[in-house]
Amino acid sequence: MNVTIHYAFLPHTDAEAALGFYRDLLGFEVRKDVGYEDMRWITVGPVGQPGTSIVLQPPAVDPGITDEERETILTLIAKGVYGGVTLGSDDLDALFERMEAGGADIVQEPTDQDYGVRDCAFRDPAGNLIRVNQID
């Protein structure tokens, strides 16, 4: 049996800013861009890896949550502590330079961690933490 990660979900608070970050800075391809009323779900993923995608979704739109819960979610997103994902790159330093030059919100420059990983981190326009590990 083979189990893979097909979709991961992250909230976005500005669809155009999310596209600028994931498509233009990270270089992901847009696989779907679906609108409903005033909301948008954008599916992006690495070129050449059609089986792995991130769905950028409007936050706190589930009809089963209360207004208070919705406000809590939006507050956590704004603080940058609600969602995150770890990516991998075969050239971490080049990716970091591109992200920095593109104005990404840098959290951590490329660092050799004590636990054996070289990584960096930044936040997307919604505040989601994006870590990137060096892969060989």
Image (spheres, helix red, strand yellow):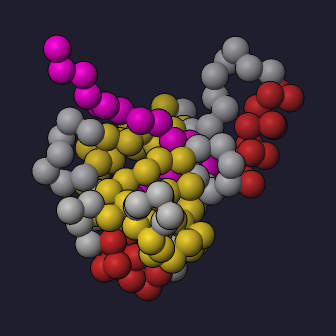
Q: Is residue 128 above or below residue 123?
A: above
Residue 65 visible (yes or no): yes
User: Residue at (74%, 45%) from the top-left corner?
Assistant: 76
The x, y position of residue 113, in whole percent, is 49, 66
The x, y position of residue 52, in whole percent, is 26, 39
Q: Quadrant of the C terminus?
A: bottom left
Q: Could you tell whether 7 is left or right of 103 in the image?
A: left
The residue lying furthest to the left in this view is: 48
Q: Quadrant of the N terminus?
A: top left
- Quarter residue 93 falls in: bottom left
User: Residue at (54%, 33%) from the top-left corner?
Assistant: 37
Residues in magenta? 1-23
Viewer-side residue, 111 vs 21: 111
Q: Is residue 55 above or below residue 128?
A: above
Q: Is residue 5 above or below residue 118?
A: above
Residue 38 visible (yes or no): no
| Residue 58 shown in magenta | no
User: Residue at (76%, 32%) from the top-left corner?
Assistant: 70
| Residue 16 shown in magenta | yes
- Quarter residue 125 falls in: bottom right
The x, y position of residue 62, in whole percent, is 63, 22
Q: Could you tell whether 63 is left or right of 27 in the image?
A: right
